Amino acid sequence: MKYLYSCLCLLLLASCSNDPENLSLTVGEEFNDLTTRVLMIDTLQIKASTFKFDSIITSNTTRILVGSYTDAVFGKTTSDSYLELVPTDGNFDLRDDAVYDSIALIMRYDRYFYNDTIPQQRFTVHEVTDNIRSDNDAFYNTTTFETNPIPIGDVTFEARPTKGDSLHISLDHAYGQLLFDRLEDNTINDIDDFLNRYKGIHIRPDTQNTAVLGFSPSFENTFIRLYYTVPDEIEDQELQKDFSVNNSKLFNHIESDRAGTIFQGLNDQENDAISSLDTNNKSYIQSGTGIALKIEVPHVKNLFDVAGENGVLMSAKLRFKPTLNSYTQNLTIRDSLLMFILDRNTEVESQVFALSGEPVYATMEDQNDEFNTLTYNAPIDFFVQTKLQERFEQNTSLSFYPLTFNSSVDRFIIDGEGSSNSRKITLEITYAVYEEEE
Amino acid sequence: MQYMKRKSSVLCALVLSTVGLYKMHAQSGSLSSSPYSLYGLGVPNDTGVGIINSLGKLGFAMPSLTNINDKNPASLGRMTQKSFLFDVGIKAQRETIVNSIVEESRFNANFSNISLAFPISEKSGVGISLIPFTNVGYILIGLENNIEGTTDTFFTNVNGSGGLNDFKLSYGYSVTDNFRVGASGSVLFGAIDETETNLIEDTALVITEENYYSGFRFDVGLQYDWSERLSFGLNMKSPAFLNGSQARTIETIGTATITSREEDNTLEDFELPLELGFGLFSNFLDNKLQLNADYQHSFWNATDQRDYLGEYVDQHIFGLGLSYRKNTRGIKYWDRIFYRAGFNYDSGNLKVNDYRVENYTFSAGVGLPISARTNSMLNISYSYGQKGRVSNGLIQENFHLLTINFSFDGKWFIKRRYD
């Protein structure tokens, strides 16, 4: 009898097993009342336009951006840099027996460059005569300060931005000697004494330059170096004192001369936008100067007319293409663009982040440009979802620009909604309807 | 020693019933594996209590002497005095499901019932049972549909599970020595869950429905003994309405924005029809051979219900059973074994494409005595059956069903002189 019980207990346990290996079970399909439909909708209207930020913050940057170039579309673009320097070691003493030798500004390339670096470039270095200061500690691409028009440094050079080199700019001897004397005779004893006399420098490009170059502002890469000697037993000892960049007082002033360009009329962020239909079916982005792409999907709720409200947004993919031949080896574009939501006044309301907390990017779908198929793909689910849930139309729109929007002069030309079918901006919405409306 | 043995058997029964209940819970996801359970409230459970599974599944005229007859409450009027009947069952089913294109195999195993009955006087008895009323268990994987506006497709997996339970309290009374009446009340309750997962590119839309139903049904019956050898039984189940409510969630997975909606809906009442059953039960060869023959008619037409799949039509069920035991008090164990055979035909209550989904079942079983002194039995039944057909857009299910019932007959109130 016991044997019987144990047999049955075993059977009971065995009956728990199930058959998980059936990967396709379709018998009975015709009995099911599945009503879920999935639709791909690509007929919503899209409007692309170009607008210009009144100003963008260029302080708190990791790049000293100096240069200038002229572009057939964007006109002349110039970036010059303001920065405050402080002694790297925080020390304002020099030995009494020290002897001044020379002074130079040394800046290490951070490998960023834009346009043609083959022709010779020229920079001049000027003393800033204003305090580099602002009410909110931020400086903008439009900010300028008074400078001494007579340069303390002037260099013409061949740019080698990608070789890991530094640019060496010899500065005026009188300037160096005076700084040396003030330190040695204790005219300057502390930071206040120093900043009262040395408010900063301004590095600016010559108008004939053909490239914009980036330099690293970190203390080991960029500094003013004061060379001096002190007597030693056998021969003089060569010493140096470095003044490095105060990162909170560094910004790039970036502007373009838009006269005669299609951006001529972009003066007011809130009101001036040029439809891509008015600019040869193209829209534009230029970092540094604040020219940006704006994309509107004015009638998102039309989705409900097509598919009903008992549905769920599964995906919304916005695709746009950089105009053919608008990007070259020298005029590079980025493979990802950040996504922002603009409010009705074309002010940035928020950057778009994924649920994971990562920023959402418009990314280049296919890096291979052999067939001119470079396309940005932007998941704009959040934007579409928000608009679907809006009670009243908020007139929000999307903007895309690169991570380096504040610290570069990268430019992008995007084919707009009026381009040919294979080139135009598209929006593909996948929408699942789980219940037909009655 | 005897005491020990008894104690161990009670313990074992408890363990098994606990396991059974646990399994009822754990396996509620696979009470059935029939595509037909997509229909209505699922496949009606036709597995019964005790010996009936191998005797044609009906049995309106059968007594509740040593086994609980759950089919007619009047049987409780004729119980062995001072007995205490307890029955717990499990079942396992392997099915082959065939349509005109594919053949698939599915397996499920489950709790089938827990019941007890005892006399409360010389003339009356009560019974309590918990039996699945309907079973839902379907799984559809990889259904492919077009994404409208593209040439791409999406895939759907559907998984249905659950079912309704019947918790029944029955009472039977002997009006005379050969005429008994009985009544029972059933609380029908349960949930049917359906999960639909749509795999759309690299995202998923999951729709989960929990459909709750509940209702009350009563049942009256009578049994009449024509002679020592022949009894008749009659049973009527009332029509009933089951109220339904639904909790539905709609969720997305893998999408850039998460949608999660919860809805509460009211479902249409489901109507159960009037059911009439008639049966006879007969003894031959000094009670060695027993025969039961039964018919049940369910008046589904009157409910006027339809489903997306088809319509409900009047249902006819015939059951036939034969039981043989050589010698009740036989010395040899083999002599005390019951041998049983049964047949059941069920016209089905479902008409799809103008064809009924019919069901034939042949059963064979044995009743193995657990001890020489009591009537406790281990009733094992094997059935083979066919449901539906391959043609006419139906599905044919060929199934092997094994049911095992522990039918305990405890003489609880007898004080033994020797133990």
Image (cartoon, coloured by chain):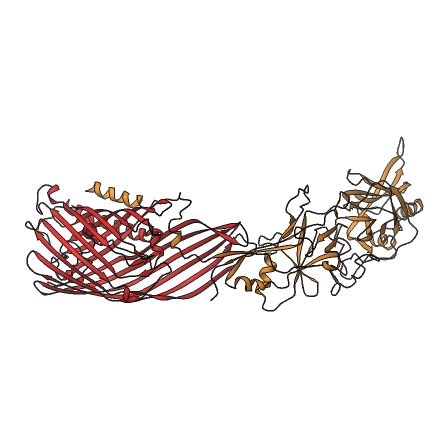
Chain colours: A orange, B red
Residue A117: horizontal and vertical position, in percent? 82, 42
Residue A432: horizontal and vertical position, in percent? 51, 57
For residue B246, side relative to residue B66 (left or right): right
Residue with the most extreme top position: A234
Q: Give the mark count.
A: 0
Residue B119, can we see it? Answer: no
For residue A315, side relative to residue A251 (left or right): left
Residue B154: horizontal and vertical position, in percent? 49, 51
Residue B321, can we see it? Answer: yes
For residue A58, side relative to residue A180 (left or right): left
Taking depth in this image into account, of B114 and A267 the one nearest to the observer is: A267
Taking depth in this image into account, of B215 and A421 the one nearest to the observer is: A421
Taking depth in this image into account, of A79 and A70 the one nearest to the observer is: A70
Rendered-image quadrant of the N terminus of chain B: top left
Residue at left offset 58%, top offset 64%: A302
Residue A93: horizontal and vertical position, in percent? 85, 46
Q: Relative to B277, does residue A410 appear above or below in the rendering?
A: above
Residue at left offset 87%, top offset 36%: A238
For residue A299, side relative to residue A434 (left or right): right
